[in-house]
Image: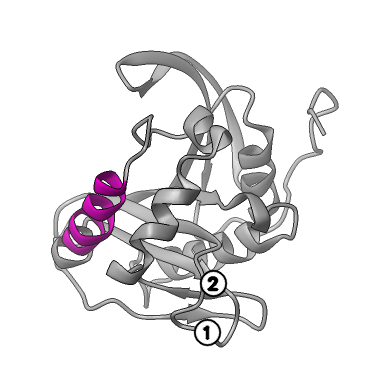
Amino acid sequence: MRGMEPFVLATDRVRLSVPTERDVDVVAEICTDPAIAEWTTVPSPYTRADAEGFVTGMVVDGWATGTSFTWAVRDPGDTDGPVLGMVGMTCEGAEGVERVGELGYWAAPAARGRGLTTEAARLVVDWALDPEGLGLVRAHWSAYVGNWASRRVAWKLGFRFEGTLRRWALQRGARRDAWVGSLLPEDPREPSEPWPAAAAG
């Protein structure tokens, strides 16, 4: 796959720029949050070395190889402002083959409940599914069963809920049940089905 230089995505509510070494300490602090440990695959306990490896290794390598594209969520107009969350698209598929990608995101505790993750994820999805962007033919979303906050973001973006896969998602050596959904380029970018009556919150 072809790599690319990092770039900024922005609206009047959020600014997405690639995390840098100056963000390492903040990322390390945020990722010690119990909710992030519960609902993501980050190491737990999370250390500064983990944050440094993520920012200077995984993020840089992903852009260079064209396999994953990661942004830090920040306040609008502030490229190097405090990290409010993280959002990215991990892709699969060789050149000349229709490519698909998986959307991922997390939010700092202080940034939750403000719609920033939804705004940021929408920017990434719109770019990834645009023929002038990545040109993906499908965006995939998954979350461990019970992660209603993640499911609500995907629902707002128009992801179609496709079911529950038992013991499908791997988290630190253990298998967990997961929800899955997808969004195609031609799908509307708004809820396509009612919010589940059984949803928490």
Dominant SS in magenta: helix
Residue 17 — which label?
A: none
Residue 139 sits above or below residue 74 on the image: above
Q: Which region shows up in magenta?
A: 48-61
Q: Position of residue 43 (x, y in %)?
A: 34, 33
Amino acid at dot 2 = Arg
Residue placed at 64% from the left, 38% from the top?
Answer: 151
Q: Farthest residue in the right direction?
A: 197
Q: 114 or 69: which is nearer to us? A: 114
Total label count? Answer: 2
Residue 159 in sight in this render: yes
Report helix, strand or loop for mark 1. loop
Q: Give me the residue at 44% from left, 65% from top.
A: 72
Quick one: 139 or 3, which is closer to the camera?
3
Magenta stretch: includes residue 55: yes
Quickly name the residue at label 1.
Answer: 78
In this view of the protein, which residue sits in the foreground, 98 or 134?
Answer: 134
For the C terminus, the quadrant is: top right
**Image: 198 above or below 94:** above
As drawn, 3 above or below 107: below
Numbered tag placed on residue 74 in the rendering: 2
Residue name at image x 55 percent, y 32 percent: 34
Is residue 143 in sight in this rendering?
no
User: Picture coordinates of residue 68 (x, y %)?
Assistant: 28, 56
Q: Amino acid at mark 1?
A: Asp
Label 2 Cα neighbours within 10 Å, binned few <14 / some 14-19 / many ≥20: many
Q: Quadrant of the N terminus?
A: bottom left
Q: Are marks 2 and 1 in contact (CB under 8 Å)?
A: yes
